[in-house]
Image: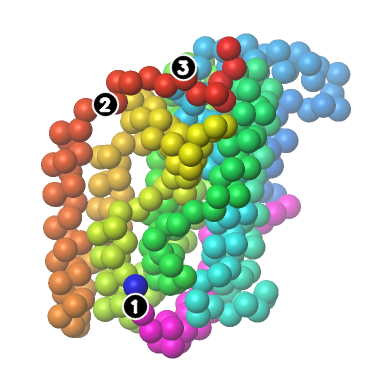
């Protein structure tokens, strides 16, 4: 993976100013933002235990696959320290805490931190989960770290986060719909507000990357092609349970998501097409030979992958997760 840190640094100086200007558009004020306690039983109130009983009652009809996907989503959200540290190690950025990159990463992390807090407490109260097993998987995922194929290149990181925030929006939105179908309106609301955050964050990362395409189209295009050629891996791809090797549980988690239609191979292609449209890839001008080859590859990729995705059969092999009680 070769790129010029010097040229990237110049572009990032431009982008970091833009990130500072746009922060208030893409992140909500902390004092008025929703917090996990807005949705959960209040332990200071006399009806606390009645509310827990209601929560458990509404959670008991959630399907096995849905609980498994929800736990996997929660563990993914709880591995937030890995994502923050990864973003602070990107090459060419200013480490000034008041600069655009570091300030964005801190505030984005603060918003994202609410997601794991909310879902973790819900799962604890639901009575459906062996919390110790889930907590072990969470600790493993943070300890194991990840390799998402971006290196420390800022362009590849912006492409990855644009894609990933769109993917998590789809996943949480679908879980919200399925929870409502299964009669759990509280969980549906929770996943709905989380999905809304992810959609806002996706819009931000796409906007930041669009600015990079405007000032450095060739390098941006080559980075996009590289990420698409090597495929976007999910942040929890090292997911594992007690006694299993790194990544062994992840396939079972994605199988459950595919069976439910929470996140599928077709969704992957749809997100790719959305990024191609949003970044106006087909209309990019003034590209050199490498940039044009990269653009042609990316533009033609979705139709190829869609043919493969449409032929894929839903995985039928069910798996017993150590996370789920009973």
Say which label, 2 or 1, has the lower sequence index: 1
> What residue is disc 1 on?
2
> What residue is disc 3 on?
63
Say which label, 2 or 3, has the lower sequence index: 3
Residue at disc 3, secondary structure: loop
- Which quarter of the picture shows residue 227? bottom left
Q: Nearer the viewer, residue 21 or 80?
A: 80
Q: Residue at x 52, y 12 (%)?
A: 61
**Dot 1, crowdedness within 10 Å: few (<14), some or many (≥20)?**
few
**Dot 2, crowdedness within 10 Å: few (<14), some or many (≥20)?**
some
Whether 289 is drawn above or below 103: the answer is: below
Magenta residues? 2-31
Q: Which mark is residue 314?
A: 2
Q: Residue at x 79, y 20 (%)?
A: 48
Whether 52 is drawn above or below 120: the answer is: above
Main SS of the magenta segment?
A: helix
Q: Is residue 194 left or right of residue 120?
A: left
Q: Label 3 near label 2: C-beta < 8 Å?
A: no
Residue at disc 2, secondary structure: loop
Is residue 11 inside the magenta stretch?
yes
Is residue 136 inside the magenta stretch?
no
- Report the quarter where the C terminus lies: top right
* Closer to the eye: label 2 or 3: 2
- Report the quarter where the N terminus lies: bottom left
- Which quarter of the picture shows residue 27? bottom right
Q: Is residue 167 left or right of residue 307?
A: right
């Amino acid at each position: 993976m070769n790129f010029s840190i010097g040229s990237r640094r110049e572009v990032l100086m431009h982008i970091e100013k833009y990130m500072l200007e746009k922060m208030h558009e893409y992140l909500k004020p902390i004092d008025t933002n929703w917090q996990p306690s807005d949705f959960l039983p209040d332990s200071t109130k006399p009806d606390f235990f009645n509310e827990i009983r209601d929560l458990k009652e509404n959670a008991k009809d959630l399907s096995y696959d849905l609980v498994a996907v929800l736990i996997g989503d929660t563990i993914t959200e709880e591995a937030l320290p890995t994502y923050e540290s990864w973003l602070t190690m990107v090459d060419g950025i200013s480490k000034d805490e008041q600069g655009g990159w570091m300030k964005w990463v801190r505030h984005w992390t603060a918003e994202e931190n609410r997601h794991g807090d909310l879902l973790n407490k819900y799962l604890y109260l639901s009575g459906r989960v062996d919390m110790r097993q889930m907590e072990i998987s969470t600790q493993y995922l943070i300890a194991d770290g990840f390799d998402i194929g971006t290196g420390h290149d800022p362009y590849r990181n912006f492409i990855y986060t644009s894609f990933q925030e769109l993917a998590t929006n789809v996943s949480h939105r679908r879980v919200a719909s399925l929870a409502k179908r299964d009669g759990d309106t509280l969980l549906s609301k929770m996943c709905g507000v989380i999905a809304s955050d992810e959609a806002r964050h996706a819009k931000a990362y796409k906007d930041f990357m669009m600015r990079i395409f405007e000032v450095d189209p060739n390098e941006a295009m080559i980075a996009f092609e590289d990420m698409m050629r090597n495929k976007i891996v999910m942040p929890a791809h090292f997911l594992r349970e007690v006694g299993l090797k790194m990544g062994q549980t992840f396939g079972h988690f994605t199988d459950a998501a595919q069976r439910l239609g929470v996140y599928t191979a077709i969704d992957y292609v749809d997100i790719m097409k959305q990024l191609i449209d949003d970044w106006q890839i087909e209309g990019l001008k003034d590209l050199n030979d490498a940039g044009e080859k990269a653009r042609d590859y990316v533009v033609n990729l979705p139709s190829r992958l869609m043919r493969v995705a449409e032929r894929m059969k839903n995985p039928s092999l069910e798996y017993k997760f150590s996370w789920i009680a009973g």
